Structure formats: C-alpha cells, structure tokens
C-alpha cells in the first residue's frame, strides 16, 4: 500500500468518533502528530479519541481499514488490560489463530510459553499479560509463508494502545517487525545479533526470534539463546508475576 493511501486510511480513522462515525465535528480534529516508534517510517498517527481501553479495543476490533487486502477478512486478534505488566508483541495471526481468535493458540505459542515459563492460565490472563501483535488480522500467504503484518495496524492503533497500558514493564519483541518498530536504529544487522545483544535493551525490551517449529535450526545454532537469554527472561517474568 502506498504511503499516500495509508495516510488517507489513517485520516479516515482519525475522523471517526467512537459510536459516531463521520460526524461534522470530525472537521475540527487537529492535525495528527507523527509518532512512529524507532524513527523509521514517518506516518501520521491519530490522537487517542477513546475514553477507555475497552472503548479503544472495541474500535480496533471493528477495524476494517485494510479489508480489501485480507483473504479471510478482518478479525483483529489482540488482548490487553490496563493492569498488565508484560506485553507480547508478535508478528500477525496465522490462519489457525484467525480461526480461533486466540493469540498464540498453536505450536509456536506452546514454545513461547515454555520460553516464558508460564502456563496457559498466566499467558491468557490479560490483567497480567497483554498480547498485541504488529498486525492484528491474518494477512494471508505469500511465496515464503505468511505475509508480513499489515502496516496499517501500527499506524492506526499501536501508539493509542500503548498509551492505555501504563504499567507495562517488560515487552517481548518477537521477530523482526516488532524489533524494527520498537528498537529502530538500536536494532542490530540481524535478528540473531539483536537477540544476542539483549542486555542493551533490558529491562524494558527482550528481543526474541519467532518460536515457530520451523526455526528449530536457529535455536540449535545459537545455544546462548537457551543458556543465557531464556533463564533471564523466565526470571524477569517470575519476578513481575509475583508482584
Ligand atoms: S489488519 Fe489491522 S488495519 Fe487491517 S483491518 Fe485488521 S486491525 Fe484494521
């Protein structure tokens, strides 16, 4: 999608009040600010126009911004509560997660929970763990697997969501899209180098590879990941869970 079209979509959503789409008042909406994280893509982000996180989440779940590009249609999959201290930022739902509406409801999710040292109950307790991927709807298949997350989600919603999650102390950045967005120029040339430099991003961020079974060779090639990074991750999550 061109930047021009993305900007038009963002402008459209910026003009929508909750429950009052396309009102005359929309004309007085101030010019949106530029606040894309990481300093890479300067895309205008709409100001927060929702009084509560629940209202914002309802608006996100009604989002149809890039419907024409989604082979299975919109079904935003995310969850959050204001009390959450841990945030998981992944890539985008796969076809299975699109079907169930439950994030990380697959083999990758099982591995992620093992990495984190948490069970399903903890993982899906949104009062403690928020789950917000870079793209909220299943983007479809490309030649090398699932397509990248739609950029519109971050441009339209992410900063608003993060602003409503004031207690997040630890953010898991899973995969290159999350790392690019949150770390920007602090990211290393490769995902392995970024993950290996995890101490540079602590305690706020922990960069991780995708826990897909297809990445098994990567896990074997980088033993420091299991030996050093994962014990730190589990200890951090355990400490946050105990509070
Ligand atoms: S992928 Fe994101 S921007 Fe597109 S319809 Fe779903 S929530 Fe909206």
Image (cartoon, rainbow, N blue to C red):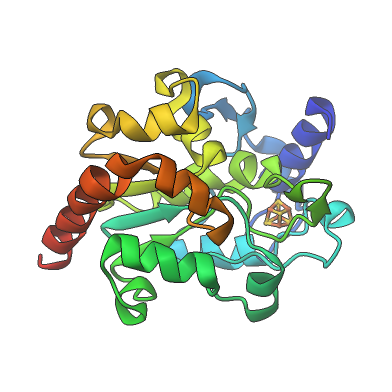
- Residue 89: where, in percent of width, then height? 46, 51
Residue at 40 percent across and 27 percent down: it is: 193
Residue at left offset 47%, top offset 35%: 179
Q: Is residue 49 left or right of residue 235?
A: right
Tell me: residue 207, above or below residue 187.
below
Q: Position of residue 171 (x, y in %)?
A: 34, 47
List the single residue furthest toward the right.
Answer: 68
- In this view, the residue in front, 5 or 196, is 196
Residue at point 77%, 59% (across, down)? 64
Q: Examine the rendered structure and indicate whether residue 185 appears above or below residue 140.
A: above
- Residue 43 visible in the current orientation: yes
Q: Quadrant of the C terminus?
A: bottom left
Residue 80 visible in this rendered orientation of the protein: no
- x and y percentages locating residue 205 in the rendered image: 31, 40
242 over 224 or under it: above or below: below
Left/right of residue 187 with respect to residue 16 in the rendered view: left
Q: Say if 57 sits above or below 207 in the image.
A: below
Residue 36 or residue 49, whichever sits in front: 36
Residue 192 x/y as whole percent:
43, 33
Nearest the eye: 212 or 234: 212
Q: Please tell me in which quarter of the rendered image ligand 1 is found.
A: bottom right
Name the residue: 42% across, 40% down.
Answer: 221
Quadrant of the snapshot with the N terminus: top right
Left or right of residue 242: residue 78: right
Name which quarter of the figure residue 188 lies in.
top left
Is 72 displayed left or right of 181 in the figure? right
């Amino acid at each position: 999608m061109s930047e021009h079209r993305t900007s038009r979509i963002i402008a459209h959503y910026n003009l929508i009040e909750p429950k009052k789409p396309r009102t005359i008042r929309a004309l007085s909406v101030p010019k949106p600010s530029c606040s894309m994280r990481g300093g890479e893509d300067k895309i205008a982000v709409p100001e927060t126009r929702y009084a509560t996180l629940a209202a914002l989440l309802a608006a996100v779940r009604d989002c149809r911004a890039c419907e024409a590009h989604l082979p299975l249609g919109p079904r935003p999959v995310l969850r959050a509560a204001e009390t959450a201290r841990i945030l998981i930022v992944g890539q985008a739902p796969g076809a299975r997660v699109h079907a169930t509406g439950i994030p990380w409801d697959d083999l990758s999710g099982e591995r992620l929970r093992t990495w984190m040292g948490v069970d399903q109950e903890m993982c899906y307790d949104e009062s403690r763990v928020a789950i917000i991927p870079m793209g909220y709807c299943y983007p479809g298949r490309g030649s090398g697997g699932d397509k990248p997350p739609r950029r519109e989600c971050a441009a339209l919603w992410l900063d608003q969501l993060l602003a409503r999650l004031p207690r997040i102390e630890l953010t898991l950045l899973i995969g290159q899209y999350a790392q690019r967005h949150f770390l920007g120029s602090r990211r290393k040339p490769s995902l392995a180098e970024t993950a290996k430099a995890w101490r540079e991003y602590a305690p706020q961020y922990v960069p991780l590879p995708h826990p897909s079974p297809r990445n098994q060779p990567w896990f074997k090639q980088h033993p420091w990941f299991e030996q050093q990074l994962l014990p730190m991750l589990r200890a951090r999550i355990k400490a946050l869970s105990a509070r």
